[in-house]
Image (cartoon, rainbow, N blue to C red):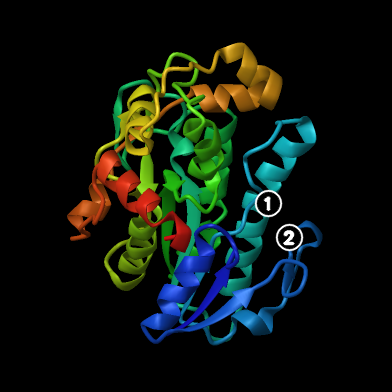
Amino acid sequence: MKIVVSGSSGLVGSPLVQALEARGDTVARLVHGRQWDPDRNLIDRASLEGSDAVIHLAGENIFGRWTDAKKQRIRDSRVRGTRLISNTLVGLTRPPTVLLAASAVGYYGDRGSQMLTESSSPGHDFLAEVGREWEEATGSAARAGIRVVNMRFGIVLSPAGGALGKMLTPFRLGLGGPIAGGTQYVSWIARPDLVAAIQHVLDKRDVAGPVNLTAPNPVTNREFATTLGKVLGRPAIVPVPAFALRMAFGADGAAMLQAGQRALPERLLASGFQFAFPTIEAALRHLLARSDSVP
């Protein structure tokens, strides 16, 4: 297939492009500032024309202090960018048959220990509102008959970056531990499984709508910290208090880190996908044993 990918240099996009090319697909990168600029509502239609599929991954990194400007970038980069791509695809002479658009389990809001599937209702906090608008932005493509998959990502685990990349140094120094009590659930997925899952839903023509791309065994933040410490051979007993989160990330960013979702990949499993790393210990041992090669 000819596949257009946005966010192709990111934590997920980079290995995904490699995997798609390795299996024989032709990948065109939709580069921000070159082929498109959501802030100015500009896009190079020719770069999308004739493609068989579009995989839209681009969006502002949620890590960092959540100022009002940061929150606006988080929302706009997701909603505006997705709407621009979706609307453009509808007007093409030969639109693609499928649009895979990133979303996140933050869609569900902070739900405690409640088990969440794709049929669960959205939450009401900032990230939940962003998630709902993010997915609604694909509506024009879906209404035009393009198969749309809203990929609700959990926390993507890789030593190359993201949450795990930021945690490795303090945990290796014996300074890691649970965040704000550690009772909140973490919906996670090992990056190799995520790359495989994206290819799976790309190829499964009967899969459309929201799909949780998370491992089948979410864990509490405390269990995550304990397991990471075990794999690294370090104690993981230094708690990170809520006030420290507020100082580092602002009130809204701290609330995000203290929130949790116990999301289950019901539709992904029903479609026949098999996880290579279904448990947190197996995933961390694999990822960290091979950290030099950045899996």
Quadrant position of residue 89: bottom right
Of residues 193 and 80, the one nearer the viewer is 193
Q: Label 2 crowding class (10 Å Cα cut-off): few <14, some 14-19, many 20+?
A: some
Q: Position of residue 156 (x, y in %)?
A: 44, 48
x, y percent for residue 66: 70, 31
Q: Which mark is residue 77?
A: 1
Q: For numbered disc 1, what is the local secondary structure?
A: helix
Q: Tag on residue 38? A: 2
Check whether the beta carbons of the residues at disc 2 and disc 1 lie within 8 A of each other. Answer: yes
Q: Earlier in the sequence, mark 2 or mark 1?
A: 2
Q: Quadrant of residue 33?
A: bottom right
Kind of residue indicated by mark 2: Pro
What's the amino acid at mark 1? Ser
The image position of residue 205, as x and y in percent, is 29, 71
Is 184 above or below relative to 33?
Answer: above
* Depth check, front residue: 280 or 193: 280
Q: Residue at x 36, y 47 (%)?
A: 189
Judge whether 63 appears above or below 9 on screen: above
